[in-house]
Image (cartoon, rainbow, N blue to C red):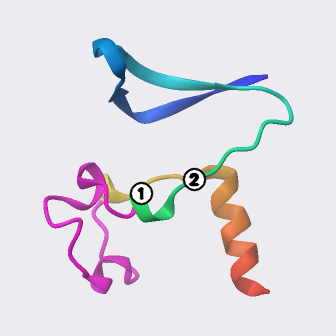
Amino acid sequence: DDVIPLQFPQKAKYNDIVTSIPVSKGQYIILSLFAYNRLTQIWGPDANKWKPERFFSGSLKESQKVNVGVIGNVYDIASLI
């Protein structure tokens, strides 16, 4: 069992603020790259616009860089297959 901290706390039902998500051993975690790539906290007010230059090497501001941890390593390896 573990807890995943959230970089951006989320407002939940009844005005609760969620800052982390508890996970149990063996539990599946599904990430939405569609939703993540449209976060205005990361990409700014034009997050829903198609701007591939955002992803070019060296074009991200330090505040836009996010450590995706283990799942990032999985995607890196998957891209080589």
- The secondary element bearing badge 1 is classed as helix
Q: Which residue is drawn at 67% across and 69% down?
A: 75
Callout 2: few (<14), some (14-19), or many (20+) C-alpha neighbours within 10 Å? few
Q: Horizontally, is 76 left or right of 32 in the view?
A: right
Q: What residue type is labelled 2?
A: Leu
Q: Position of residue 40 (x, y in %)?
A: 23, 54
Closer to the chain start, of discs 1 and 2, is 2
Disc 1 from disc 2: Cα separation:
8 Å
Asked if the magenta segment contains residue 54, the reply would be yes
Q: Position of residue 31 (x, y in %)?
A: 57, 53
Magenta stretch bounds: 36-61
Q: Horizontally, is 32 left or right of 4 in the view?
A: left
Identify residue for label 1: 36
**Relative to the observer, which residue lies in front, 23 or 76?**
23
Q: Residue at x 79, y 36 (%)?
A: 27
Q: Are marks 1 and 2 in contact (CB under 8 Å)?
A: yes
Callout 1: few (<14), some (14-19), or many (20+) C-alpha neighbours within 10 Å? few
**Relative to the observer, which residue lies in front, 33 or 81?**
33
Q: Where is residue 7 in the image (x, y as percent from the top left)?
A: 42, 37
Quadrant the N terminus occupies: top right
Q: Which residue is drawn at 64% across and 50% down?
A: 30
**Relative to the observer, which residue lies in front, 73 or 17?**
17
Q: Which amino acid does label 1 sit on?
A: Tyr
Q: Horizontally, is 47 left or right of 19 in the view?
A: left
Task: Name which quarter of the figure residue 48 lies in.
Answer: bottom left
Asked if the magenta segment contains residue 33, the reply would be no
Circle on res. 31? 2
Task: Name which quarter of the figure residue 25 lies in.
Answer: top right
Task: Classify 65 as above or below 19.
Answer: below
